[in-house]
Each structure stands twice: as C-alpha cells, then as structure tokens.
Image (tube, helix red, strand yellow):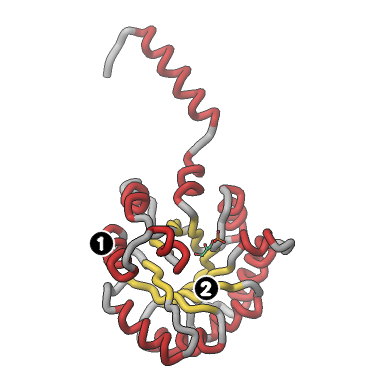
Amino acid sequence: MKFFVDTADTAEITELAATGLLDGVTTNPSLVHKAGRDFKEVVAEICHIVHGPVSAEVIALDHEGMMREAEVLRKIADHVCIKVPLTIDGLKTCKKLSADGTMVNVTLCFSANQALLAAKAGATFISPFVGRHDDNGFDGMSLIEDIRLIYDNYAFHTEILVASIRHPIHVLQSAKIGADVATMPPSVIKGLFKHVLTDKGIEGFLADWEKTGQSI
Ligand code: G3P
C-alpha cells in the first residue's frame, strides 16, 4: 500500500520524505489555508521534495474553469495530480484530463456509485473520505470494501486512495481490504511507528548493554 501525506506543511513533508516511506502528497484548499502560503508556490516546493504524485485541487465548479485551473497547476510539475470534486463537471474534467495523460484525483467521494463513475471517467485515484463518513454515522470502511469489490469486478485501474483518515486503525483496515493508497495527516503516519512495547524493549536492552561495559 502506498503512503501519501495529507498536508501542505513543507517542514512535515520534508521530515517524512526523509524516512524513504513517502510515496506522494495530497493537499486541499483547507490545508493550503492552514499552511498560510501561496498555493502555486507551495505546490512547487512540495514537488521538489516528493517525486510521487502531488495532488493540487481546482477551485472552479464549472468544467471550463476547472480546465483553465488544471492547465495552470499541471505546468508546475509533471507529477502534479489534478484534484477535482465528484460532480458532473468534475468528472467531465477528469475524463478530458485523463485522456491527455494527466493524473487526476477525484475527491469528496461518499458512495460506491460515485466511485464507479470516477473509474469510468478514467480517474487515476478515487478519494473516499472515511473519517467524515464515520462522523456522520456511516461506516467509512464498508465504503472502501464496496469500492474494492466493484473495481475488482471490472478490473478498473483507478486506485483507491483512502482519505480523511483519522487514526492508525483506519490504515490497518484499509490495508486489510486492499486499498491502494492511504493519505494520512503527519500525526497518523508518525503514530504507525509507535508501540509502547518497542519503547520498553529498547529501554531494557540499553540498560543491560550498559552493564556489559562494551561498545560497538
Ligand atoms: O484531503 C482530504 C481529506 O483527507 C480530508 O480529511 O480530516 O478534513 O476529513 P478531513
């Protein structure tokens, strides 16, 4: 499973990229607002740090406007992935951009039928939002299961990019279902490394090693 980080904070991205485990980045207008930086400038900087897909979202709601914005964004770097919302205009844009060989991430997916439409429109990635699904009393993970089943039934190439991940259990469940990508806030990625027994084990080994009086 690929690991993407869901942030526009370049310091966090640099830190995580240094692990060698980061496959891409997703941003959205709220994350750009949080970073407090110029959108195009921050996307360009992210593209220098990470060489996998970097999602940058259009703001226009109409097809022509989305195409105009996509044109600007895709000039930033070849690995910019244009993020469009799951609407009729968004999917029209997805179809056109995908036919031109541009990567497209279809975002704000909340149903398996929407994911089916995105795959038919040639999306590179579909982004179902599991956390927001859970927040509203639905089961985010059963949505991922349904999409996996449908995509496998028809051998669609669209990758399932699980978004709105809130905790490591979402990552574990996504991996068990066979999702292609998990995009996570930096805190969740860091949380995956942690286990209290790992810390305790290191502590015990170090204490015993010290008693040996040796060095390596
Ligand atoms: O990038 C979209 C997504 O991951 C948003 O997450 O936590 O705002 O629902 P959240």
Beta carbon of the mark 2 residue lies under 8 A of ligand 1: yes
Please state which of residues 53 and 14 is positioned toward the viewer in this rendering. Answer: 14
Q: Whole-Å distance between the Cαs marked 1 and 2?
A: 24 Å
Q: Which mark is residue 48?
A: 1
Q: Quick check: 207 above or below 128?
A: above
Q: Is residue 71 left or right of residue 187?
A: left
- Disc 2 is placed on an element classified as strand
- Residue in the picture at 48% in, 89% down: 62
User: Which residue lies most toward the bottom here?
Assistant: 64
Q: Quick check: 187 above or below 28?
A: above
Q: Quadrant of residue 142?
A: bottom right
- Residue in the picture at 45% in, 68% down: 29
Q: Quadrant of residue 57?
A: bottom left
Which residue type does callout 1 highlight? His
10 Å crowding of disc 2: few (<14), some (14-19), many (20+) = many
10 Å crowding of disc 1: few (<14), some (14-19), many (20+) = few
- Residue in the picture at 33% in, 62% down: 37
- Residue in the picture at 56% in, 57% down: 165
Q: Is residue 8 left or right of residue 181?
A: left
Q: Position of residue 97 (x, y in %)?
A: 40, 86
- Residue underneath mark 2: 107
Please state which of residues 49 and 51 is positioned toward the viewer in this rendering. Answer: 49
